[in-house]
Amino acid sequence: MGKAFSKSYKLIIIVIDLILINLSYITAFFLKFGFDIPMFNLRPYLNAMPFITLAALIYFDMFGMIKFYRKSVNETLSNLGKLVGLLSITTVSITYFLQGFSFPRTVLLGSAFIMFIYLSVWRVFLVWIRQKLMRETFAMLVGSHDELKTIGRKIISDKAQKIAIKYAVDVTDANTALKKLEDVDEVILCPSVPDDVKALMIKECIERKKVVFAIPQLFEIALAKTRTVQFEDMPAFIIDRLGLTPEQRFFKRAFDIVLAVIGLIVSAPVMLISAILIKVTSPGPVIFSQERVTINNRVFKIYKFRTMVVDAEKKTGPVISSQHDPRVTPVGAVLRKLKIDELPQLFNILKGDMSFVGPRPERPVFADRFSAEIPAYKYRTLVKAGLTGYAQVYGKYDTSAEDKLRFDLLYIRSYSLLLDIKLLLTTVFTLFRGKNNYQRVNGLEGVHGTKRKAV
């Protein structure tokens, strides 16, 4: 009964979504023509409506809008912005293909704005209802001493999840974890949990109808997107080779070239103004180049607008940049904040050193250090380095190298051209939203029952 109700609930929401999408086009027509809409202009929309609706369904699934589990307002608005933008581009393509040249462009632009308002009000209302109705869930975190502090801190800081850490149990004390299982709704297993303990905990959680979150070890990410095969009556997982197929590399490269050319043309005025400001306000070259590592551990020269003083590392040696870095010039701070300093990397993309999406390129000295500390780090160079990536979209500036690697490996394992488009749209939306990548959560030292203040 519960599952049937849940499916009906989702179906009703999606139907309302689709009605609102098509209503936004109708509203835009009314705003332009009033009640006397010329059939000559309306017909292209009516012809395209089934295809627009189908595309909307695909994009709702692509951006995770069909799953309603614990989504925040920010995540909802971000996904809606990307969905509306992509659907507007799709509408232009569909009407052009159907030779609907009489579809007014003002209606197209207006409908995108109206669509975002309609869907935002509706979806934010759903988030508000869910947050009001959904109670705080009590969880047990199982892991090493360090994991209980660092991972617990991340869980508590994520207000959208509404998870309260009731128990933080050391991985060596499996018996205590089993005894306390009845007092919690969910169990969160950290990477250090041994396989036998993990299997036991998952088995017990399934039997007691508890939700399990398993934070993967690096090698376990290889199990993502697995396919199944049968050896007679025995099922098995196929773990494909990590990396892109020749076909994927071809289409990714074609996409990079087209987008880089467009990007250079559109951003040329901004790049020219930036170059003049750098030259006028700070002595030294306009372009800063530095060795970075890309696919197959190949070292290349990355290009950026110079945002620091000349010879910034002369005294310190190679160091990772930080917030409020004193070496950054005033103009450089603005360029960094707006990400304009990254624009010269469009030339790196055209040259084939980089892609639009991929793991961010590290300097050889740091790549060697991380490879020595984290053996799986070498796998991130199975694809080209990127201008943006999974770790940049979903991580923070101070996310650890190992956690960033998890994101990078998930990207490589889950790669598709649609994923690249999604990450690019998310990056653009994040820039306009002004996301703070330096955000931190402070000191959590001990367990305090169901309180959110400590772990």
Image: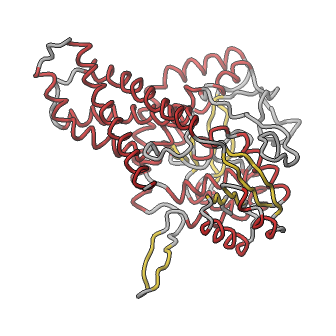
Q: Is residue 424 visible?
A: yes
Residue drawn where x is 76% and y is 36% of the image = 440
Look at 71% across and 75% down and name the residue there.
196
Residue nearest the viewer, comparing 96 with 151: 151
Question: Left or right: 57 with respect to 138?
Answer: left
The colour scheme used here is secondary structure
Provide residue 323's location: percent of width, then percent of height: 77, 31
Which of 222 and 343 lies nearest the eye of the viewer?
222
Report if residue 346 is visible in the image.
no
Left or right: 420 with respect to 152? left
Is 236 situated above or below 323?
below
The spot of residue 124 in percent (x, y) is 49, 30
Could you tell whether 41 is left or right of 446 in the image?
A: left
Count every numbered label the image shows and give the total. 0
Quarter of the rendering containing residue 265? top left
Question: In front here: 396 or 298?
Answer: 396
User: Can you name the residue that lies furthest to the bottom here?
Assistant: 232
Q: Closer to the camera, 335 or 230?
A: 230
Residue 268: x and y, percent?
48, 24
